[in-house]
Amino acid sequence: MDTAITYRTATVEDALTICELGQLLNAIHHAARPDIYTAATQDFSRDLPHWMSFFEKPTQVVFIANIGHQAAGFISASLSTSSGPLMQPLDFVRIGSVCVDEQFWGKGIGRTLVKLVQDWASERNAKDIRLSVWTFNARATRMYTELGFEPRALEMGMSV
């Protein structure tokens, strides 16, 4: 019998677990872009300052998925407002990181985490959800497209 997948808002007590899960993101991104991303580490606390900031503001959230007592994935998001003379005033949510432990891929965890962010955004009257995904991350791109995200901009860069 499969153990149920549960979802909840992460708390500061989950920070080190999120750091540990986040090493999968570090590994994937470092493998494709070692010029930009650091390698994964066994010293999970290295990333604590980054993740702790998500628990300090009501405009940021992390949701965590568990299978039994094991963390299976997480998603982070932030509420923002576009402003300035060239922009329509608009509250929007930006998804920062989505991570699912490889052993749990294919169980719909990433999709459910995105749905939790959609609900969180709606509760805050946000009108848009945005995210960035690297072109090398075909698996994530496919999921986001299937969920209704669409390409809107192309970020370009070059080394100097």
Image (cartoon, helix red, strand yellow):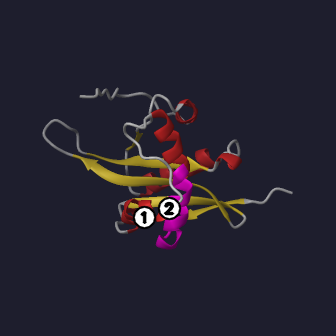
- Say which amino acid is labelled 1: Leu
Q: Which x, y percent locates residue 19? A: 50, 60
* Residue placed under numbered mark 1 in the picture: 48
- Compared to residue 144, the image places residue 76 above or below, namely below
Q: CA distance from mark 1 to mark 2?
A: 7 Å
Mark 1 touches mark 2? (CB < 8 Å): yes
Q: Which residues are magenta?
A: 10-23
Q: Which x, y percent locates residue 40? A: 50, 50
* Residue placed under numbered mark 2 in the picture: 44
Q: Is residue 15 magenta?
A: yes
- Say which amino acid is labelled 2: Phe
Q: Nearer the viewer, residue 43 or 106?
A: 43
- Compared to residue 61, the image places residue 114 above or below, namely above
Q: Quadrant of the C terminus?
A: top left
Q: Which x, y percent locates residue 70? A: 68, 63
Residue 85 visible (yes or no) = yes
Nearer the camera: disc 1 or disc 2: 2
Q: Residue at x 51, y 66 (%)?
A: 16
Magenta-drawn stretch, dominant element (helix, strand or loop): helix
Q: Quadrant of the N terminus?
A: bottom right
